[in-house]
Image: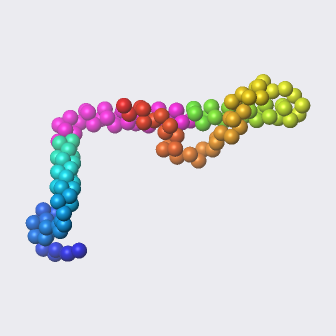
Amino acid sequence: MMNFHDVHTLQQALDIAPPPRLCMAQDRAEHAERQRRLLVAHEDERTMAEWHRRHPEDVTYEQAYWARRREEDTQRRRDERLDRRRRKALVISQCDNVQNGGQSIFSADDDRWLDMWIDTSDQTSEDSDNDDEDDDWE
């Protein structure tokens, strides 16, 4: 890596740096594609900055929207955890009934028996509960 002490901008460094060593046509094509994407990304950033400058009400609306979405997602996860805890508690109470000689409200082949194995910890990350979260973005 070269150090340029008299260069102050990226463009100046690019101007005096040697061109990348590309061995094959495929390397050149991939490099050109990466450069094109980089230019598009920079233009997108510039355009968004200009939009935010001209339309601050849109920025305010967007921030409020995402804050509301985060709160709704948090509440949904809380509700799902509470539901899992209730289902697990019901199954455990039925197990206790059966062990103490009583009858269960579940039949022997009832799928609710599987709820005994539900994880009810609060140690799950926000990303681990996204079974159908991807559908929300469409």
Q: Is residue 76 magenta?
A: yes
For residue 130, side relative to residue 88 (left or right): left
By secondary structure, the bulk of the magenta-drawn segment is best described as helix
Would you say residue 95 is visible in this rendering? yes
Q: Residue at x 49, y 39 (%)?
A: 130
Quadrant of res 22: bottom left
Q: Position of residue 85 (x, y in %)?
A: 66, 35
* Numbered marks: total: 0
Quarter of the rendering occupied by the C terminus: top left
Q: Residue at x 16, y 74 (%)?
A: 4
For residue 62, side relative to residue 114 (left or right): left
Q: Position of residue 120 (x, y in %)?
A: 64, 41
For residue 88, side relative to residue 42 (left or right): right
Tell me which colouring the rendered structure shows: rainbow
Q: Position of residue 107 (x, y in %)?
A: 77, 25
Quadrant of res 96: top right
The boundaries of the magenta stretch are: 50-78
Would you say residue 71 is visible in this rendering? no
Q: Residue at x 38, y 33 (%)?
A: 137
Q: Residue at x 71, y 37 (%)?
A: 116
Q: Position of residue 118 (x, y in %)?
A: 65, 39
For residue 54, side relative to residue 137 (left or right): left
Quarter of the rendering occupied by the N terminus: bottom left
Residue 54 against residue 16 in the figure, above or below: above
Q: Is residue 105 magenta?
A: no
